[in-house]
Amino acid sequence: MRILTGVKPTGKWMHLGNYLGMYQPFLEKVQWQEGFLFLPDFHSLTSVHDADTLRSNKHRLAAELLALMPNDAPFTIFEQSQMSYINDITWILSSVTPYSLMLRAHSFKDSQNKNSEINMAVFNYPILMAADIIGYDVDMVPVGKDQKQHLEFARDIAGNFNRTYGVEFFKLPEPYVSDTVATIPGTDGRKMSKSYDNFIGIFDDEKTLKKKIMSIVTDDTPLEDPKDPDTCNVYALMKYFTSGQRLEEIAAKYRAGGYGYGHAKLELLDILLEYFWPARERYQKYMDDYSLVQAELDRGNALAEKIHSDKYLELKEIVGL
Ligand code: ADP
Ligand code: TRP
């Protein structure tokens, strides 16, 4: 079983919501499978138009993703733009993709509502994404809910191609959308999101991390009064990163009174630093010496390129090029 997912380097770093909502389900699925994680950097060109920014976004995101990956996970990380034939495959797929299908894309409609002028890359985005997936004979794609429609498009496009040429060439990929993961609350209690600036970044320096945690919104129950842990935003986050006796003890302290939200916040900081300590160490190592990241990317690029280019050579034959 081959599993693949992509994280766009658009200057958005991994926060607790991304980690629990997207990355952990990917890791769970990848445990015993062949896992591919890639940086869709061509996709970033829909919005990032500065070379240094794109390079540094990619650099940091690759270091973050690698740092969060357990050492023994059998996975491959690679860069979309290093695949020789990704745009050739996209072009061929676009020739079997109805215009009317693309007009239905939520991502396109959203951009249309927000901007008066949209670039063509936004319009073609789902076809490139289909080439990312079906070009590697992927079985399963873990994605967030917002990407589910793109997966349906990839299946439609694969099916259109197979029907048009009378072949069983492209596999129809299955989306894996984890519905069991709750929406992780941000510092203001709304969904944690970069767009709301209420997120807690996994790799923020300790000072920033503390500041963010201290800004978590709580009610005004006085320090000495008993509190209900189940209605507290701080406790809601703790629950994901600690369990068992430690969590029970914290809940008991809430209920007993004399335990303020400031205490709880410092405890959350402690819990997060402990939980992410190995990843934060690895991240620093990768940021200090980028050649370590590059070595992983080179290895992954070579492996992914072999699969993708073999697929393309067969594809050329089928369409008569
Ligand atoms: P953001 O809202 O911060 O821009 P993205 O839209 O880039 O985050 O989300 C990337 C992935 O992380 C998606 O798969 C999404 O479902 C998941 N995700 C983001 N925020 C949360 C959250 N607060 N709770 C659960 N999952 C989340
Ligand atoms: N469109 C995805 C996003 O915006 C990123 C992406 C590109 C992707 N190609 C992919 C995700 C292939 C999964 C599989 O988040």
Image (cartoon, rainbow, N blue to C red):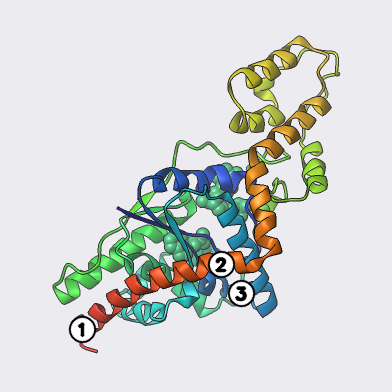
Q: Earlier in the sequence, mark 2 or mark 3?
A: 2
In the image, residue 30 above or below residue 241:
below
Q: Secondary structure at mark 3?
A: loop
Mark 3 and mark 1: Cα distance apart in space: 41 Å
Is residue 240 at least partly visible in the picture? yes
Q: Which residue is mark 2?
A: 111
Disc 2 versus disc 1: nearer the observer: 1
Task: Please report contact status of discs 2 and 1: CB closer than 8 Å, yes or no.
Answer: no
Q: Residue at x 83, y 46 (%)?
A: 207
**Residue type (three-letter) at the residue carrying disc 2:** Ser
Seen from the viewer's position, the closer of residues 290 and 83 is 290
Q: Is residue 28 left or right of residue 155?
A: right
Disc 2 versus disc 3: nearer the observer: 2
Q: Which residue is mark 1?
A: 317
In the image, residue 85 above or below residue 209:
below
Q: Secondary structure at mark 1?
A: helix
- Residue 28 at what x, y percent from top left? 43, 42
- Count residues near mark 3 (Cα–Cα under 10 Å), then give few for <14, some for 14-19, many for 20+: few
Seen from the viewer's position, the closer of residues 284 and 9 is 284
Q: Earlier in the sequence, mark 2 or mark 1?
A: 2
Mark 2 and mark 1: Cα distance apart in space: 37 Å
**Residue type (three-letter) at the residue carrying disc 1:** Glu
Q: Which residue is mark 3?
A: 116
